[in-house]
Amino acid sequence: MTVLTRLAQLPAVHAERLKRILFVLCLLPLARWIWLGFNDGLGANPVEFIIRSTGFWALAFLAITLAVTPLRRWLQWPWLLRLRRMLGLYAFFYACLHFAAYLVLDQFFDLAAIVEDVLKRPYITVGFTSFVLLVPLAITSTDGMIRRLGGRRWRRLHRLVYAIGVGGVIHFWWLVKADITQPFLYAIALGVLLGERVVHHLRIRVLPSPGTSGSARAAIPLPRD
Amino acid sequence: AKLAEVRKSPLSTMEPLTSYKDITHYNNFYEFGTDKSDPAQQAHLLRTRPWTVAVEGLVRRPRVYDIDELLKLAPLEERIYRLRCVEAWSMVVPWVGYPLSALIRQVEPLGSAKFVEFTTVLRPSEMPGQRLPILAWPYVEGLRLDEAMHPLTLLCLGLYGEVLPNQNGAPVRIVVPWKYGFKSGKSIVKIRFTEFQPRTSWNLAAPHEYGFYANVNPTVDHPRWSQAKERRIGEGLFARKRDTLMFNGYADQVAHLYADMDLRKHF
């Protein structure tokens, strides 16, 4: 318990150090692909491997980013919020690699085929849309953009991440041939993360406790890192 | 183990072979798991001796063949075929076997026999994938009798001059090179001749995605992805995809089987 309490009051310096360590850790999937690439480790179908793996990590970072706010609430570790922007940008980073792998390795800039894919194949339509929706969120992730937009509008815009998460899971689900175990696990994780928000929202609506400064605003905080 | 006296065949392609490692480590054989690396890891669990294949249904001489009889039923040939998976990747595989027609002639199908059904072994204790409800086990595939009699259709017992590895469908499988890979049943224990079209596993699982015929056809897309191109396994990270050929390049030999059929409808 004391550890938890101490972690709750982690000094800003330590939180900053933790963030730097995490920054490096988040690059490990990329480092792994490079290492495997130079050591004949990408398997019989390296293009499929890279596309699957980048997609996996894009979804994973999306889920990790979405976990920050619930974890912050449950553990009461306010400093977790300092990590959220970086994690969200990593989701965007791996989504970019995923899209780049499709564009270059899979399609080799065959724009006609890509347009046909996006228009005709629902799983690509959904995946592509989710990727495009990530772009404004990445662009408006800077302090300057948050100030320019104003907190309310920024928060409203960034609620898009919920739709992107759902889109990402559907994209994965519709791609699978028969064994839906993996997308199902993602769907469960996302369901928990989004469900927690719904429950929290309803609770502060129905039972505005006098103890907390319980406004809906506090539920969806702005990054302060 | 090496197979003795394997003859070359004029029906083989001259294209460069996919490596033994890729052919044996990149497999769709859901009985051993749905990841392509699962069969290579799990297939050792399957015991392929003793093994028998029951040939039954609408035939004059139904019989149960022992695997050693099947190995000697006709001269073994090496057939280097393109393999096109419905997932839009392809390989070039040096199979060993002989035309399925050699076996079919021995059992003498009746006039009423129109289709042939191939059933894969059902052994959840040795095939971990069969403990999961992924497909309707046992795996069943089927061909029209004229397709099964076609000289390209192989009863396959080997690979790269050796006994077939378990993950590739040991001890005996079917190879139908102008159809998507899933049409070629593996680890066969029953061959049944029927009057009506067999109810096949993938067709039951998703009838709008996997037709009974499943001929390789670049002009008829899978509902979820294009079939116009394919990725040749083993060509590396920066290779371009190649165009998929009608009937996987075997159109000259097999197109006449489907002359009066609408291939969009009978996909």
Image (cartoon, rainbow, N blue to C red):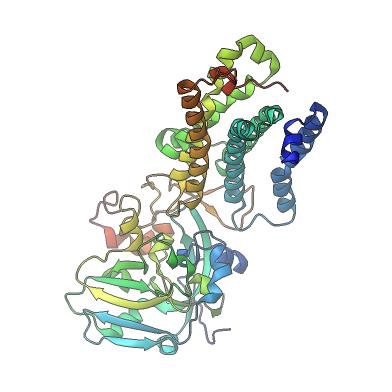
Q: Of B23 and B93, which appears nearest the observer?
A: B23
Q: With B117 as the anchor, is B41 left or right in this view?
A: right
- Residue that appears at 53% across and 86% down: B5
Determine the residue located farthest toward the left in the rendered image.
B112
Determine the residue located farthest toward the front in the rendered image.
A210
Q: Of A36 and A133, which appears nearest the observer?
A: A133
Q: Of B90 and A216, which appears nearest the observer?
A: A216
Residue B15 figure quarter:
bottom right
Quadrant holding the C terminus of chain A? top right
Residue B174 figure quarter:
bottom left
Residue B72 figure quarter:
bottom left
Q: Of B29 and B122, which appears nearest the observer?
A: B122
Q: With A18 as the anchor, is B208 left or right in this view?
A: left
Q: With B23 as the anchor, is B104 left or right in this view?
A: left
Quadrant holding the N terminus of chain A? top right
Residue B226 image point, x, y percent: 43, 45
Residue A18 image point, x, y percent: 78, 35
Q: Taking the image as drawn, is residue B17 in sight?
A: no
- The tally of labels here is 0
Residue A223 image point, x, y percent: 67, 22
Above or below residue A29? Residue A110 is above
Above or below residue A77? Residue B164 is below
- Residue that appears at 34% across and 72% down: B118
Q: Taking the image as drawn, is residue B67 in sight?
A: yes
Residue A28 image point, x, y percent: 73, 44
